[in-house]
Amino acid sequence: MELQTIDLYKEYAGGRKMAVNGVNLRLHKGVYGLLGANGAGKSTLMRLLTNLLRPSRGQILLDGQNIKGLGADYRRLLGYLPQNFAYYPDFTAREFLLYVAALKGLNAAAAQKQAGQLLAAVGLSEQARRRQRIKSFSGGMKQRLGIAQALLGNPQILLFDEPTAGLDPTERVRFRQLLKVLAADCIVLLSTHIISDVALSAPEIILLENGRVVRSGRQAELMTEIGAANLEQVYLYYCQGGASDNVKIG
Amino acid sequence: MLKLVEFELKKIFARRSAQLALAAVLLLSVLLGVSGYLNMYAFDGKSQEGRGGEAVRIDKEVAAHYAGWLTDEKVQQMLADMQLQGDLHGLNPVYLYHNAIQSALFVRFVDLDAGWNGQTVAGVFGAEPIKIGYILGWLTSSQNLVKALVALALAIIIMLVPVFAGEYEGVNNLILTSRRGPQAGCLAKIIAALLAAVGVTLLTLAVNLGLALALYGTEGLDCSILFAPAEFSENYIPCNISCAQLLAYQILLALGSAGSVGGLGLLFSALCRSQLAAFGAAVAVYLLPVVLPVAESSALFRLVVLLPLYQAQFVALMSVGQLSGGLLYAALAMPVALASFVAGAMLAWRIFVNQQVC
Ligand SMILES: Nc1ncnc2c1ncn2[C@@H]1O[C@H](COP(=O)(O)OP(=O)(O)OP(=O)(O)O)[C@@H](O)[C@H]1O
Ligand SMILES: [Mg+2]
């Protein structure tokens, strides 16, 4: 499976703002960390990849076929956690998952089974058992529910926009472990500006600045290339507008 | 699909705004019904006078005396029985109210001195036979139902505005990226919206008509609406139909109203990103005919009267007249309502599915 973007552009404000500016990517099975500053265009790129947003120019291909024409066949493969995960406040976590499962076309038995498994996987079984409404969840609990809903239906393309926002250290570790399992079968794209999140879980890194991919490749190679000790240095090197002048490396 | 519809219904009815709106409509129905009953007044012209239940009893007693087909002999008999005793002091006898039958008689058959005005039954009502009896209870209930149905239309808009607009708060991301969301997910929304609108309409009808049945019984249902007291003579439906037929049309039009208002609510729900804006716009369009400068005599009125507001406010629509075969023009509102729902729902669907999530 290959997800490819070809000369992808997205402009706003009548062309005055290029949120995504000529992005060419090829994604295969594995975890990709999409790193960039606030406003770099990470969420816009994610939305283009979900087909929620139409590109101004360029195309997105899945195994050579434009996703625009694939419709439900493409959506069937998708799992998406938006940056601002929204929910129905009066639903319980299980109800919400069952709703999303129905949207994804899971039958009742599969929906029940997967909802139970995913609630356990993100540590929300207790809240589900108590039939706690989502509105009474903490921020991190809501985010975990968001992660769980993305995983329903065993999607093969997972797009997580800032998945670790609001998660405590234990939950971050749990999420990382989840990613390891998913990496074997799925394309996972993980956007964040928290470098430590991707440093530990994404072997492939895509650095985005002002809508452009300034560098991408295997984490280890990127570090060796410039003699960086960690990913943070790689990020600062590429993403601070010629940062090599003001950052000492090595 | 069933599961999705179930979820959509839950979303609609779980909202506090929907629950409050529905409760308000039902409370209004009960208050109007009960106050209408308590405010009834009747005097049999001799010794009995009363309000509320007593008035209804007196009215029914007087009506029972003359029940059946209205003939010229019966009019003369009534005029003789209801001869006024004292001086009217210049009051037009049309405005004199003793009881429902007396009022119906005076409005049509007396002159300024409260004597016979020379009119015959055929002269007033035409060739069709007129069945008379106690109809005031049902006519009053029907008028109360008009008010309840207009309030219900607003309640339906409140209930349906979040169907699409609520998703713009973020769940649209999940709906539109899921396999079945854009198709089955949206269709489920439309089906649930229709079920909700029709369901609350049936509930409102049941409460209103059930209350009327409890207060006034089945009497008068087979009588013509034409021999009615003064308040139902001018600007009221001029067709010789029975109370039961009147209610049947009102029930049908109420269901039509549920559909057309549902279509309107869904359309603005998808069109406006904010629920408040969607509500404001839908209500404005719903109430628009009130400010349209279209006279009842103009040809355009026959079209205006098919708009959703007049399906609840049904007197104007029912007054347009007959089609062929005894069917009233009002029946045309049903296909119009169906078309409004389908058009509103389909447009809403298109708008929602083709949105760009920025
Ligand atoms: N609807 C919009 N209209 C105009 N400009 C927009 C719109 N959405 C995003 N932008 C602009 O596009 C650019 C990229 O935004 P985007 O949300 O993709 O950034 P991001 O990398 O996800 O940032 P963050 O880390 O803060 O989430 C920003 O400059 C933003 O202001
Ligand atoms: Mg973002």
Image (tube, coloured by chain):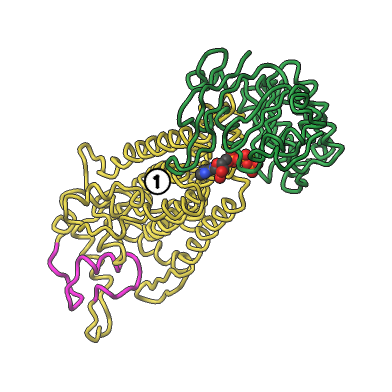
Q: Residue B34, image x and y in percent?
A: 51, 63
**Figure quarter occupied by ligand 1:** top right
Is residue B8 located in the magenta-colored stretch of the structure? no
Neighbours of disc 1 within 10 Å: few (<14), some (14-19), many (20+) = many
Q: Residue A98, image x and y in percent?
A: 69, 30
Q: What hue represents chain B?
A: yellow
- Residue occupying the far front of the picture: A245
Quadrant of residue A218 within the rendered picture: top right
Q: Residue A227, image x and y in percent?
A: 79, 28
Q: Which residues are magenta?
A: B93-119
Tell me what residue is drawn at x 62 percent, y 52 percent.
B16
Q: Residue A90, image x and y in percent?
A: 68, 45
**In the picture provided, is B120 more to the left or to the right than B46?**
left
Tell me what residue is drawn at x 24 percent, y 40 percent.
B326
- Residue occupying the far right of the picture: A170
Secondary element under disc 1, as helix, strand or loop, is helix
Q: Which residue is mark 1?
A: B257
- Whether residue B173 is visible, yes or no, is yes
Depicted A144 relative to depicted B54: above or below = above
Is residue B114 located in the magenta-colored stretch of the structure? yes
Quadrant of residue A56 within the rendered picture: top left
**In the picture provided, is B148 more to the left or to the right than A223?**
left
Quadrant (top left/top right/bottom left/bottom right) for the C terminus of chain A: top right
Q: In this orientation, which residue lies closer to the viewer: B230 or B10? A: B10
Task: Tell me which amino acid carries mark 1.
Answer: Ser
- Whether residue A86 is visible, yes or no, is no
Quadrant of residue B94 within the rendered picture: bottom left
Q: What hue represents chain A?
A: green
Q: Chain of mark 1?
A: B
